[in-house]
C-alpha cells in the first residue's frame, strides 16, 4: 500500500455527491493499492447534511478510505489534492434564464480556481460537473494561475454514455460493441452526439442502424433532452448516472485508452477543428494512461454535422461573452 490519492469533491452533500462518494471510497477508480483521502466542500448551511453522509461513509468501513475532511473553505478542501471534482453549484431557480445561471455560478468558480492555484498538488486534475459545466470550467481555468490549462476538463461523459446506450439498444448489440462515440460542444441541448464517426463492432453505425432519419433526428434529440426526461419522470435530476459518468471520466484519464477508441470530454480548445482557443469544448480525446490527453484529429464532419457543431460553438461563445469580466 504505497500511495494516497487526495480527492476533493465540492457540493458533496448533494445528490450526485451521495452516489459518487461511496464509489470513490471503495477504490473502484484508483485501484486496490491506493488509499483515498476525501476532502469535501459544501456551503455552510449544508455542512450538517454532509456530516450525515460522512457517518454513512464511516459505516461502510471502506478499508481504503484513509481520511475525510469536511469544510466550507475551498482552501482547506483543495489542500494538496490530486483530483478536484467540482460538482457543487447553484441550481437554476424558477424563471431563471441560462444566462442568469451562468452569472450566478461564475463567482463560485472564480474563487475555486484561485484556491486550487494556491493549495492543490502540483499534479492536480480538475473535472467540472456543476452546470453550466463548460463555462464554469473556463472560469475556473482562467482564475487558476499557473495550473496548466490542460489539467481542466468539464463533463460530457454522461452524454457520451447516453448516446452509447441509445445506439446499442437500437442496434440490439452490447454496450461494449459500440465505440468512438463523440459528443461535440457544450453540455447542453445544443450538444452534437455524433453517430457518423461512431462504430459498432468496428463498422459504421449505418451497417447496423439503417434508419438514417432516426440517427439524425430522434437519436440526437433523445441524448440532448435526456436530462429533462429524467427530471420529468423522477422529479429530480440525474444523479446515479451523473456520478457514474464522473467516475468513468476519471478512469478514462488515468488508464490508457484502448487502441482505436476514444472518449468525450470538454477540454480547452487548442484551435483544433476551428474551435475558438480556450473554449471548453467537448472533443474526442485519448489518454496516455497518466492523465494526459490528446484531442483526436482529422475526423470528418458531414455538412449536417458542421451545421450542428457551429450551433453549439456559437452557444459557448455567447456563454463566454456573458462571463467575460470573470475571465
Ligand atoms: P444538488 O443540488 O443535489 O447538489 C448541489 C450541491 O452543491 C448542494 O449540496 C449545494 O449546497 C452545493 N453547493 C452550492 N454552491 C456551492 C459552493 N459554492 N461550494 C460548494 N458546494 C456548493 O445537485 P446535484 O444533483 O448533485 O447536481 C450538481 C450539479 O451537477 C448541478 O449543477 C447539476 O446541474 C450538474 N449536473 C451536471 C451534469 C453533467 O453532465 N455535466 C449532469 C448531472 C447534473 O445535472
Image (spheres, helix red, strand yellow):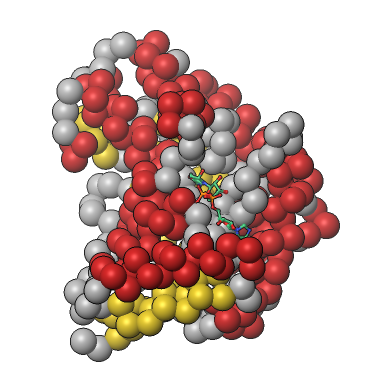
Q: Quadrant of residue 173?
A: top left
Q: Position of residue 87 (x, y in %)?
A: 52, 57
Total labels drawn: 0
Q: In what quadrant of the picture does the C terminus appear?
A: bottom right
Q: Residue at x 64, y 68 (%)?
A: 44
Q: Position of residue 133 (x, y in %)?
A: 58, 49
* Residue 309 seen in the figure: no
Q: In what quadrant of the picture does the N terminus appear?
A: bottom left
Q: Residue at x 42, y 64 (%)?
A: 53
* Residue 107 seen in the figure: yes
Height in image: 116 above or below 310?
Answer: below
Q: Residue at x 19, y 40 (%)?
A: 176
Q: Position of residue 232 (x, y in %)?
A: 48, 26
Height in image: 80 above or below 31?
Answer: below
Q: Quadrant of residue 160?
A: top left
On screen, residue 2 versus residue 311, left or right, reads left
On screen, residue 164 versus residue 299, left or right, reads left
Height in image: 85 above or below 185?
Answer: below
Q: Residue at x 80, y 53 (%)?
A: 324
Decide which of 238, 46 is in the foreground and name it: 46
On screen, residue 146 versus residue 195, left or right, reads right
Q: Position of residue 218 (x, y in %)?
A: 42, 16
Height in image: 116 above or below 219?
Answer: below
Q: Residue furthest right?
A: 325
Decide which of 150, 41 is in the foreground and name it: 41
Amino acid at each position: 500500500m504505497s500511495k494516497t490519492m487526495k480527492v476533493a469533491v465540492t457540493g458533496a452533500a448533494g445528490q450526485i455527491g451521495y452516489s459518487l462518494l461511496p464509489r470513490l471510497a471503495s477504490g473502484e477508480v484508483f485501484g486496490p493499492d491506493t488509499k483515498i483521502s476525501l476532502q469535501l466542500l459544501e456551503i455552510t448551511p449544508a455542512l450538517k447534511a454532509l456530516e450525515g453522509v460522512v457517518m454513512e461513509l464511516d459505516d461502510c468501513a471502506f478499508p481504503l478510505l484513509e481520511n475525510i475532511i469536511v469544510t466550507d473553505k475551498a482552501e482547506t478542501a483543495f489542500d494538496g489534492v490530486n483530483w478536484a471534482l467540482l460538482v457543487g453549484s447553484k441550481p437554476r431557480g424558477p424563471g431563471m434564464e441560462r444566462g442568469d445561471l451562468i452569472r450566478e455560478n461564475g463567482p463560485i468558480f472564480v474563487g475555486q480556481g484561485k484556491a486550487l492555484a494556491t493549495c492543490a498538488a502540483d499534479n492536480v486534475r480538475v473535472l467540472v460537473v456543476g452546470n453550466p459545466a463548460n463555462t464554469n470550467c473556463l472560469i475556473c481555468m482562467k482564475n487558476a494561475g499557473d495550473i496548466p490549462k490542460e489539467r481542466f476538463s468539464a463533463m460530457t461523459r454522461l452524454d457520451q454514455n447516453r448516446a452509447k446506450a441509445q445506439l446499442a439498444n437500437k442496434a440490439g448489440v452490447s454496450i461494449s460493441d459500440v465505440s468512438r462515440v463523440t459528443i461535440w460542444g457544450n453540455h447542453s441541448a445544443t450538444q452534437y452526439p455524433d453517430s457518423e464517426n461512431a462504430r459498432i463492432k468496428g463498422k459504421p453505425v449505418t451497417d447496423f442502424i439503417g434508419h438514417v432519419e432516426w440517427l439524425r433526428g430522434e437519436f440526437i434529440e433523445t441524448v440532448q433532452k435526456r436530462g429533462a426526461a429524467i427530471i420529468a419522470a423522477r422529479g429530480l435530476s440525474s444523479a446515479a448516472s451523473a456520478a457514474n459518468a464522473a467516475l468513468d471520466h476519471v478512469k478514462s484519464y488515468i488508464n490508457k485508452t484502448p487502441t482505436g477508441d476514444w472518449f468525450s470530454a470538454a477540454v480547452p480548445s487548442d484551435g483544433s477543428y476551428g474551435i475558438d482557443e480556450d473554449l471548453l469544448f467537448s472533443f474526442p480525446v485519448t489518454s496516455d494512461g497518466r492523465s494526459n490527453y490528446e484531442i483526436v484529429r482529422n475526423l470528418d464532419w458531414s455538412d449536417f454535422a458542421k451545421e450542428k457543431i457551429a450551433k453549439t460553438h456559437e452557444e459557448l461563445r455567447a456563454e463566454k461573452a456573458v462571463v467575460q469580466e470573470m475571465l
